[in-house]
Image (tube, coloured by chain):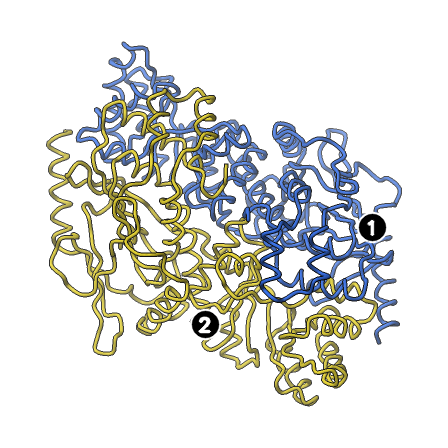
Chain colours: A yellow, B blue
Amino acid sequence: MDLGTTPLLTDLYQLNMIQAYLDRGETRLAVFELFFRKLPPRRNFLMAAGLESALAFLERLRFGEAELAWLRRSGRFGAALLDYLRELRFDGDVDAMAEGELFFADEPILRVTAPLPLAQLVESRLINILHFQTLIASKAARLVLSAPGKLLVDFGLRRAHGAEAALMAARASYIAGFAGTATLLAEAEFGIPAYGTMAHSFVQAHDDETQAFENFARARPANLTLLIDTYDTQAGAEKVVALAPRLRAVGIAIAAVRLDSGDLDALSRGVRRILDRGGLHDTAIFASGGLDEDVIATLMRAGAPIDGFGVGTSLTTSNDVAALDCAYKLQEYAGRARRKRSTGKATWPGRKQVWRRFDGERRMAGDIVTLSDAPASGTPLLRRVMTGGRRVAPPESLAMARRRAADNLAALPATWRGLAQAASPYPVRIADDVRQLAEEVDRFMERSSP
Amino acid sequence: MDLGTTPLLTDLYQLNMIQAYLDRGETRLAVFELFFRKLPPRRNFLMAAGLESALAFLERLRFGEAELAWLRRSGRFGAALLDYLRELRFDGDVDAMAEGELFFADEPILRVTAPLPLAQLVESRLINILHFQTLIASKAARLVLSAPGKLLVDFGLRRAHGAEAALMAARASYIAGFAGTATLLAEAEFGIPAYGTMAHSFVQAHDDETQAFENFARARPANLTLLIDTYDTQAGAEKVVALAPRLRAVGIAIAAVRLDSGDLDALSRGVRRILDRGGLHDTAIFASGGLDEDVIATLMRAGAPIDGFGVGTSLTTSNDVAALDCAYKLQEYAGRARRKRSTGKATWPGRKQVWRRFDGERRMAGDIVTLSDAPASGTPLLRRVMTGGRRVAPPESLAMARRRAADNLAALPATWRGLAQAASPYPVRIADDVRQLAEEVDRFMERSSP
């Protein structure tokens, strides 16, 4: 069973419910929407990501013989359910926001319209895919905003939560505007540029730091970056200056030095001075080590002469906010709107559309959430991406999503671009038709289930 | 390429360094140790997990034709490196702490002894595997300590960071003492008991809540748990009581009700009264929805009549501490001890052992970190698990790791069992032989690289 595609990567209760639905023939059309309930502190927007992975999951959805055999052996389910699962393919419709789109609380980013058991089954993995990539794209966008014009590289494989998290974080951060990633597999799988420097162990394995630099330079001369903080950063910079002529003589330029510890503001200034004094004006300074958007913003404000940043843990775990309040909720079944009213978790019923208005300078000016068949009132953000289980267009390129993300960030007004929580949230209005429908649903439920 | 096993899931710099090592024949024996630099706030201990996954990764390590072809196409590497990678297998030694063992800052939990390029190559994925499972086992252990005697179930698939995170979190939390998981694949892959209730959508899909309960009960009568907070929790409980006789008549008992929102303390008391008044003394109350160890501890202290907890996001993302400060560092190369001295990130050199002392009541009484060939001074925690790339014993069962975790938690003194940060850390002493070696390494480096 392949971990990324097996339909057993779901919550047991999904199959329990499907069994109950099948027992009573409850297989009429259901509409589920995926949305984020409220933005956490210090998130003024979210950036949609993961749709392509979600569609690939839906396209490949099937219970293979291994899964069916295991389900049978588990003794939990009857033959009718197993027969149903054997034939199951995703044949529903999907409407969704494109990757790279900015969105806000209460705005659906994906709608699934499919027979109830099928729409229910895919919940767990759909959230698992879309929540994580959206989480990381949103975090990465903050990093991008904190370092305008700087080179940002994902360094987060080792602390990412497992293999898929590492790969998907590389993907989501690239969409959001990162230049690339240290994770080689992301280049192999997605064509995301891989960046690589050297580790402290390389320096340590040599008795002499300069010798380590020289050996590495001769082996990997292209885009050469030397890590200079293994013992003493400023001494490391002096060694780089001393080595440079010997390398230049054989045609090797030192593209950058990397600092990975200590006071990056002070060290980068000291190192810049040493490099410049040694004539290495074109050698860039690249920083890493425990960076996040706040540290980077502080360095930028201080004017630290740093040209690029490798961001690891804070990016790939979104460590200040490791999860978002995301839900996939039934909004309509068998032609009737539905609504959950649990304390603090009530939902807006029906099929909805998100419309965005722009001002004269193409800045985002406010969103409105209406029922999906309401007349146009701006640019609609949810578009049909799958009909009857088939994509309506070929997979979008990462370059396209990346461009959309950049356009969106450029269109975001200053009020919501900062790292701190804005005084008031970006304006999202729930339209009257949605509110009226909610009241109707409530009245109906009170009549039918007193 | 399988995401979980492809050796391309590594940082590009590993291959850059290997190229440089091969160019100069630097393939002598290296010793790397994996350890955690310091514990984050509110973590008084960590619990080792992930070793079995790490060993499986090492056993399977190989560059297949697809990987080699891609590396060749990338144009980055020469034929000699590709030939080397084609033949590469993990043939090193591994010493490690067993899963379920508690440990502390500066204690190595894994040592790899292998030719330098090989020991370097495996760094990224080894950390990726061991960091995450240790993170989650450590978080789960806090949850276990906060709810003695209660049933704890992992509900975290949807907010986990991808597929592997979900599966590995189920595994790590089961080791730490969780009863099971909602993630079906974890039962299929690891035999971890799967638990499943029902979702709000099931209730919403029915016009009548009682009808939803009854349909579900008839379809899934075993260990029946009804979710009662979709509209009004107390009204839901009344409906359960009214329904119970009809179900009892057909031999179905309502094992539990689930609350997923609102004031769980007040609601659980109200629901308990309603159930008891209706004669449903054996119907348990199960709670979920945004729980973490602090919320659970508060509910337990208040005496809320809750019998079990489903914990999702806070468990599988370890949301208060989404990453630990974990490192894999070169401690010896070619027979000579090595040490990194970067500001705030200096390491203790040499091959080390962790010894634990116990008091007369088998409580943990303090650890000491010595060089690995020092005379015994307690119970050694690192044991040989792989020699020349082969395991010295068959894979350990999850049950065994789970028992060790329980024994370890029982042996942890009260001072470090609390959720808050203890006044002083658990005593870990770095032995004099390690300190002397560090000084020798420093003197050697100063002589050789002035």
* A164 shown above or below B207: below
Question: Do circles 1 and 2 both sit on a common chain?
Answer: no
Image spot of residue B132 (x, y percent): 57, 47
Subunit bearing disc 2: A
Badge 2 local density, few (<14 within 10 Å), some, or many (20+)? many
- Type of residue at label 1? Ala
Tell me the SS state at disc 1. loop
Image spot of residue B448 (x, y percent): 87, 72
Q: Residue at x 30, y 59 (%)?
A: A104
Toward the viewer: A57 or B364? A57
User: On the picture, is B438 further left or further right than B50?
Assistant: right
Toward the viewer: A387 or A132? A387
Query: Splitting the image into 4 quarters, where does residue B384 fall?
Result: top right
Give the numbered dot on residue A146: 2
Subunit bearing disc 1: B
User: On the picture, is B175 further left or further right than B344?
Assistant: left
Image spot of residue A23 (x, y percent): 27, 22
Toward the viewer: B24 or B50? B24
Give the numbered dot on residue A173: none
Image spot of residue B182 (x, y percent): 44, 33
* A407 shown above or below B358: below
The answer, for residue B295, to whether it is visible in the render is no
Give the numbered dot on residue B431: 1
- Type of residue at label 2? Ser
Query: Splitting the image into 4 quarters, where does residue A200 fall?
Result: bottom right
Toward the viewer: B255 or A5? A5
Gap between marks 1 and 2 measured at Cα: 44 Å
Tell me the SS state at disc 2. helix
